[in-house]
Image (spheres, grey):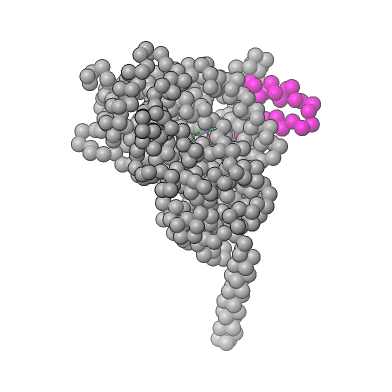
């Protein structure tokens, strides 16, 4: 009996070794990377996600090269690290890398709809519509600036209520940024105390936290198991459903009011397009795509912009000399209280500081994944169609071959010797190529207009007794600062 048991164990071990060797052989064409074990792949290498930090992918690139593979269970994820490699993916081979991965969660939640995670004809049509409609709604024009200005004034009022005492600016900023998207998509902004609005903000925040969690990765790797288990992933899915159902309610309201006959917001323009294309067999305009488009705008546009503003205020409070220089430039150049986004061109130092904040305090772990649309040969490796690709935007923003002091906050990265602003091709914060960020212009406008309004009203200071605010981010798919408090001291009473 004992002999049989030993025989079975030995047989099992031999089978496992053979399976492992076969797996290694079939994966030999992929770029190198941490050892991939059966079932779990390479996630042991970063303590199953728990030991992952901002430097992890950059350290792997130092060890394995600018292109390396991480196996999430049986799914290969190819990372490209450093400016040159990221540029090759996003710009030089833009078409071949133009898809988004269709992983279990993305299929489950997005169902191939919308803009951010769709592919092919649906993506082309929905993205084109999104771009044109954002322009119609005033992005890049004075009308959107007025909307952002209104939100900024609200934010100034909320900050002023704190009377210079320490407070956490996170929620008011998130409220303002979300309200810009509400106005654009639903046609109106919410009062901050509105229960639906609070529910929407909560749900978006919850979803984005979930995307960086261990349970997110476990679901991506073992969907067949995880979908039957209880756990935080189910709350993540419920939060996504909450966003979808709130958007659906808004669509129903628009349909009842028939406001699309004189369109004034994203939903109206979309319903009108659906109507126009009713008999067009190539049309992908339907309600599911509309719901997903609007959710995409909320998910892609709220936390990213909010985090950038939170970092901006934190960094300016930590660097009062830089804050004072920005304020002085704004006061010297913008003589009246009225200003517009175009004025940024007259403010080289402010422009450099804003770029440096986004470079050194990038709001996302590595940008947004791509997928190969065909088999692609890159850096000597043949990457099969359908492979998930991470063009690690953060690594390009921190590439020591291109930035003088990559880890430091140094606005000189964007200034020439005469103090003029210099646009840098390495600045890939919004991605590039076919799938470059759809909201780049909106985000830039928002960050500039909100910050100028805040800096004109307040001097940001550290709370009494605090020497410095923590500049290490929280690490998930998004990378916000740790919660912090600072003082917004009104300018009129401080001088
Ligand atoms: C600081 C703010 C923001 C940053 C850093 C940012 C960054 C990015 C990046 C890196 C991508 C992927 C680009 C690529 O694959 O090459 C992206 C995609 C996208 N962003 Fe943004 N974004 C910001 C704000 C916004 C805003 C305000 C909106 C809209 C309201 C928005 C909507 C989108 C959409 C819809 C996509 C998907 C585009 C596609 O797949 O075709 N983003 N963003």
- Asked if residue 383 lies left or right of residue 324, the reply is right
**Residue at image point 48% right, 19% down:** 145
**Disc count in the image?**
0
Which image quadrant: the N terminus? bottom right
Left or right of residue 105: residue 338: left
- Say if 381 sits above or below 136 in the image: below
The magenta stretch spans residue 285: yes
Q: Which residue is painted at 60% across and 20% down in the image?
A: 136
Magenta run includes residue 417: no
Which residues lie in the magenta part? 266-292
* Quarter of the image with the C terminus in it: top left
Q: Quadrant of residue 317?
A: top left
In terms of depth relative to the viewer, which is nearer, 71 or 383?
383
Instruction: Name the residue at 57% across, 87% down.
Output: 3
Looking at the image, residue 452 lies above or below residue 399:
above
In the image, residue 384 lies at what x, y percent? 66, 54
Residue pictured at 61% horizontal, 32% vertical: 293
Please tell me whether the stretch drawn in magenta is mainly helix, strand or loop: helix
Question: Residue 435, can we see it?
Answer: yes
* Percent coordinates x, y for residue 244 in the rendering: 58, 33
Residue 412 position within the rendered picture, expressed as x and y whole percent measured from the top left:
36, 36
Please say if 404 is above or below 243.
Answer: below
**Residue 389 percent across, percent down from the top left:** 58, 49
């Amino acid at each position: 009996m004992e002999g049989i048991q030993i025989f079975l164990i030995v047989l099992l071990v031999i089978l496992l070794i053979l399976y492992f060797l076969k797996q290694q052989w079939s994966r030999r064409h992929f770029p190198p990377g941490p050892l991939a074990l059966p079932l779990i792949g390479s996630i042991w290498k970063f303590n199953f996600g728990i030991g992952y930090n901002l430097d992890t992918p950059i350290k792997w690139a130092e060890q394995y090269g600018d292109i390396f593979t991480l196996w999430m269970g049986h799914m290969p994820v190819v990372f490209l690290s450093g400016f040159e490699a990221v540029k090759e993916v996003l710009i030089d081979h833009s078409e071949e890398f133009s898809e988004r991965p269709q992983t279990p969660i993305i299929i489950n939640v997005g169902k191939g709809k919308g803009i951010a995670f769709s592919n092919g004809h649906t993506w082309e049509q929905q993205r084109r519509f999104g771009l044109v409609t954002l322009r119609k709604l005033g992005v890049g024009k004075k009308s959107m600036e007025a909307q952002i200005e209104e939100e900024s004034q609200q934010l100034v009022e909320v900050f002023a209520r704190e009377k210079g005492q320490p407070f956490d600016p996170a929620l008011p900023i998130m409220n303002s940024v979300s309200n810009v998207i509400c106005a654009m998509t639903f046609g109106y902004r919410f009062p901050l105390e509105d229960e639906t609005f609070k529910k929407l903000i909560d749900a978006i925040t919850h979803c984005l936290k979930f995307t960086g969690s261990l349970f997110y990765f476990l679901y991506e790797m073992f969907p067949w198991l995880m979908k039957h288990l209880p756990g935080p992933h189910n709350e993540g899915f419920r939060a996504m459903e909450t966003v979808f159902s709130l958007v659906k309610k808004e669509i129903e309201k628009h349909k009842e009011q028939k406001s699309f006959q004189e369109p004034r917001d994203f939903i109206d323009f979309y319903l009108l397009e659906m109507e126009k294309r009713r008999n067009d067999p190539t049309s992908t305009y339907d309600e599911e795509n509309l719901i997903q488009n609007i959710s995409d705008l909320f998910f892609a546009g709220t936390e990213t912009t909010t985090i950038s503003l939170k970092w901006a205020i934190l960094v300016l409070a930590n660097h009062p000399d830089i804050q004072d220089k920005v304020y002085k430039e704004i006061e010297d150049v913008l003589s009246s209280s009225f200003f517009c986004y175009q004025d940024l061109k007259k403010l080289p130092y402010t422009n450099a500081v804003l770029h440096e904040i986004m470079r050194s305090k990038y709001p996302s772990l590595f940008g947004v994944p791509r997928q190969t649309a065909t088999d692609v040969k890159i850096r000597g490796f043949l990457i099969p169609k359908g492979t998930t690709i991470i063009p690690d935007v953060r690594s390009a923003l921190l590439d020591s071959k291109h930035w003088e002091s990559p880890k430091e906050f140094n606005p000189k990265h964007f200034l020439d010797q005469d103090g003029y602003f210099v646009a840098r091709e390495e600045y890939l914060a919004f991605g590039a190529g076919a799938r470059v960020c759809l909201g780049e212009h909106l985000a830039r406008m928002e960050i500039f207009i909100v910050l100028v309004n805040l800096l004109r009203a307040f001097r940001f200071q550290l709370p009494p007794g605090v020497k410095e605010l923590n500049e290490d981010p929280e690490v998930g798919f998004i990378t916000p600062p740790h919660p912090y408090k600072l003082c917004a001291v009104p300018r009129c009473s401080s001088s």
